[in-house]
């Protein structure tokens, strides 16, 4: 009887622990939805209205909302910004230091798990790729992708010790970006969730694509005993 009670208590504690997992997202347009970002001044791609570039019109259709509903995890902070690059270089040579992943990374609350979903705009904006660099970054170094990627991961680990960190890698990026992400994530021992065959509209996940992302991310987190 005593052993049965202890086993039941252990199962209960494991269940409560899984349900209490708090998830934060550091992302770009793929993870946005009007009214559900922190801060709410971040630019969005997905809205509660139909328009020609997507059939996603409800937050419940987003990959991250599907993931939360199906795993029991709780949203801590979704700090996603449409068009944002990991580095400080933006479209047409614009300075994106106000919205880059490197700038926004300290504003993710107190999560148990962080999902970083980026690098798409670094490629689309033709940001400089730069050299691999793992320390002593200057502000100028962060205008290139590789130094900024390393800076981001190191500072995420410094800001959020004992938090599980994952990088979600889009399925349409160049070899330069893919290999850079894999190399730098390997240096920091950060798992990469590589997406495959995501349905898109105007370069962005549609309803079917959101479902595919949710399924692939969920499978990776489940395999790592995150819930």
Image (tube, rainbow, N blue to C red):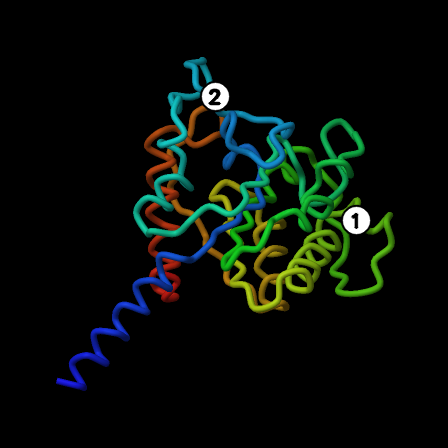
Q: Image quarter for residue 26? A: top right
The location of residue 224, given as percent across then percent down, is 39, 66
Seen as rendered, the residue at the extreme left is: 1
Binning the other alpha carbons within 10 Å of mark 1 as few (below 14), some (14 to 19) or many (20 upward) gives many
Binning the other alpha carbons within 10 Å of mark 2 as few (below 14), some (14 to 19) or many (20 upward) gives some
Q: Is residue 95 above or below residue 56?
A: below
Most foreground residue, 47 or 214: 47
Q: Is residue 162 above or below residue 137?
A: below
Screen quadrant of the C terminus: bottom left
- What element does badge 1 sit on? helix
Most foreground residue, 53 or 63: 63
- What element does badge 2 sit on? loop
The location of residue 218, given as percent across then percent down, is 35, 52
Task: Give the labeled residue for mark 2.
Answer: 47
Task: Give the labeled residue for mark 1.
Answer: 142
The location of residue 180, given as percent across then percent down, is 63, 56
């Amino acid at each position: 009887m005593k052993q049965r009670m202890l086993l039941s208590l252990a199962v209960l504690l494991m269940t409560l622990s899984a349900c209490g997992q708090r998830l934060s997202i550091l992302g770009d347009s793929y993870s946005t939805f009007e009214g559900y970002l922190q801060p709410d001044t971040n630019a969005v791609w997905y809205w509660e209205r139909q328009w020609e570039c997507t059939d996603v019109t409800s937050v419940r259709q987003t990959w991250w909302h599907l993931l939360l509903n199906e795993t029991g995890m709780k949203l801590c902070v979704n700090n996603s910004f449409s068009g944002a690059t990991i580095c400080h270089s933006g479209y047409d040579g614009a300075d994106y230091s106000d919205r880059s992943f490197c700038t926004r990374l300290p504003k993710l609350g107190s999560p148990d798990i962080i999902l970083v979903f980026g690098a798409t705009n670094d490629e689309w904006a033709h940001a400089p790729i730069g050299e691999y660099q793992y320390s002593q970054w200057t502000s100028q170094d962060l205008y290139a992708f590789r130094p900024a990627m390393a800076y981001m991961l190191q500072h995420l680990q410094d800001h959020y010790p004992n938090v599980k960190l994952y990088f979600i890698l889009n399925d349409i990026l160049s070899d330069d970006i893919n290999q850079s992400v894999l190399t730098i994530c390997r240096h920091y021992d950060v798992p990469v969730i590589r997406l495959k065959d995501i349905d898109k509209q105007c370069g962005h996940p549609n309803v079917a694509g959101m479902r595919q992302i949710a399924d692939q991310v969920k499978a990776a987190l489940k395999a790592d005993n995150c819930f």
